[in-house]
Amino acid sequence: MSREEFESLVAKALEDLPEEFAGLLDNVVVLVEEEPDREDLEALEMEPGEELFGLYQGTNLLERDSFYSGALPDRIFIYRGPILRHCDTRREVVREVRDTVVHELGHYFGMEEDQMPF
């Protein structure tokens, strides 16, 4: 799958968010990257062979207070390489992209891993 098509899937996942969630997105950018940085994998203490599909970096909405400046946007990375390696069909890629976008937005909203729908 081309990078352009993959980026379109990420954009579609964002467009399909329910309005009550989409309306709360503020000062956050979603980026497609080929692979996660080694430093990020080490910081997450990932085992060799484990794949990272997405990553949220920033201050989630629950931790923001009146002193939050938001000078730089929070970032959500969706990693194309790991998702494509994990999925066997286009349908699986579409589902994984959507699930990963929703999962990382869950972190933006302040959800913990055990609270995530995916």
Image (tube, grey):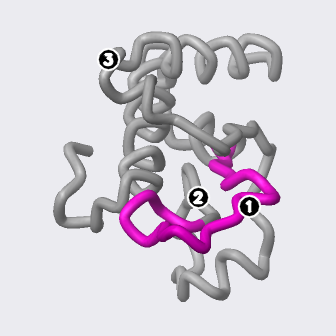
Residue topped by disc 3: 18
What's the mark number on residue 36? 1
Task: Tell whether 113 sits left or right of 61.
Answer: left
Residue at point 80%, 44% (across, down): 34
| Type of amino acid under label 1 | Pro
Residue at point 57%, 58% (across, down): 56
Q: CA distance from mark 3 to mark 2?
A: 21 Å
Residue nearest the observer in this picture, 12 or 29: 29
**As displayed, is residue 21 above or below residue 30?**
above
Query: Which of the 4 image quarters holds residue 5?
Result: top right
Task: Tell whether 116 sits left or right of 109.
Answer: left
Identity of the residue furthest to the front in this view: 66
Q: Residues within 10 Å of mark 2 (few under 14, many from 20)?
A: many
Residue topped by disc 2: 55
Q: Main secondary structure of the magenta part?
A: loop
Query: Which of the 4 image quarters holds residue 6?
Result: top right
Residue nearest the observer in this picture, 102 or 61: 61
**As displayed, is residue 67 above or below residue 31?**
below
| Type of amino acid under label 2 | Leu
Q: Which residues are magenta?
A: 59-79
Residue at point 57%, 51% (across, down): 54
Residue 29 in the image: state x and y as whole percent.
70, 40
Residue 71 in the image: state x and y as whole percent.
80, 59
Is mark 3 in CB contact (under 8 Å) with mark 2?
no
